[in-house]
Image: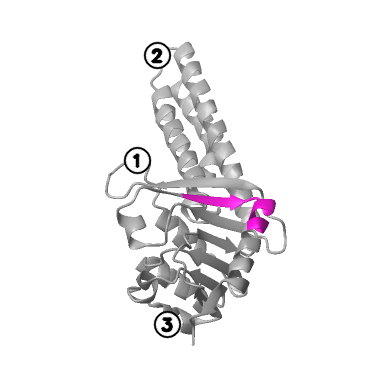
Amino acid sequence: MKVKIRYLLIFILLPFLIGYGLITTGLIERDPLRLEKSALSSLEDALVLAEEIQDAEDLEEAQGLGEDIEDLLEDAIDDLEDAIKIGEGRTKGGTEPQAGLEVYFAYPATGRQEDDQPEDVLIDCLKELNLGDRLDIAMHSFTDRDLRKAVEGAAKSGVVIRLYLERDYINREQGGAPGLEEICKAGPVEVRLESPPSYLMHHKYAVINGQTVITGSYNWSDRADTKNWENLLVIQDQEMVDEYSADFKNLWDNYSIPFCK
């Protein structure tokens, strides 16, 4: 009985173990972190039940565990399919992305399970950009050193970047390394400051290739990464993305002065 069940489980679980390997090695799009974590959790729970089913006392108990495993595998399949669809929408140049919304929450230094570490999500998005990609950023505070390094790295890779900031001393004088001057020199980058200086520019969004918007309460700042409770949204809805693109163009063309020399 146990031998037959063991071979049956290997046959059933093999495709999902292969999928698990594709995720962990990075061959499946890793950007939708929440979907990835959910799929892996379902697979791990299924493997635990697979061990328990071998010790089932009777056929009825084994069937019950088998039904639970089937439910978990269906959940994993749904999450993996959604993750792959989102990845395809982001990586296929010249095609319309899949409409979608991802939400991430920041609860730094609390140990809360809900902390999705939005800084890592942003850095992963920036690392995926390649030569000729376009990145428009409108940001109230841009003091996170790791994000500045990621932006500088994207610029060095040939990403065309427009960075629009509030005309604030935090951005101009306390930027840390790398500073805005270094970003200006890194590649095809333009930096502009709010003008006239009303100190009312509190936008926190980025537009990637006119197809994806990253926004929310999350400033690209050290405080957002280490102290504040924040949220980050990744939006792939073309109508909504177009609205953000139009807003950025208006700010850039009519309410800014150059920073890069």
Q: Residue at coordinates 57% horizontally, 46% vertically from top-left?
A: 101
Disc 2 element:
loop
Tag 1 residue: 113
Amino acid bearing label 2: Glu
Q: CA distance from mark 1 to mark 2?
A: 36 Å
Question: Could you say where residue 150 lies in the image, as x and y percent from the top left?
Answer: 44, 69
Residue situated in front as seen by the camera: 118 or 179:
179
Q: Please, which residue is most extreme toward the bottom here?
A: 261
* Left or right, 244 with reference to 66: right
Please indicate whether residue 237 sits to the left or right of residue 178 in the image.
Answer: right
Q: Give the amino acid at mark 3.
A: Glu
Q: Which residues are magenta?
A: 232-243
Q: Earlier in the sequence, mark 3 or mark 2?
A: 2
> Which secondary structure, mark 1?
loop
On residue 212, the disc is none
- Mark in front: 1 vs 2: 1
Q: Residue at x 58, y 57 (%)?
A: 213
* Residue 123 visible in the current orientation: yes
Coordinates of residue 171 in the picture (x, y in percent): 39, 71
Front position in the image: 31 or 73 = 31
The numbered mark, 1 or 2, whose residue comes first in the sequence reads 2
Q: Is residue 147 above or below residue 105?
A: below
Residue 11 at x, y = what percent? Answer: 55, 34
Identified at 63% across, 48% down, the residue is 85
Assess whether mark 2 and mark 3 are in contact (beta carbons under 8 angstroms): no
Asked if residue 233 is among those painted magenta in the image, a careful observer would answer yes
The answer to whether one can see residue 190 in this image is no
Image spot of residue 241 (x, y percent): 64, 56
How many residues crowd around disc 2 within 10 Å: few (fewer than 14), some, or many (20 or more)? few
Residue type at the position of mark 1: Gln
Q: Which residue is mark 3?
A: 181
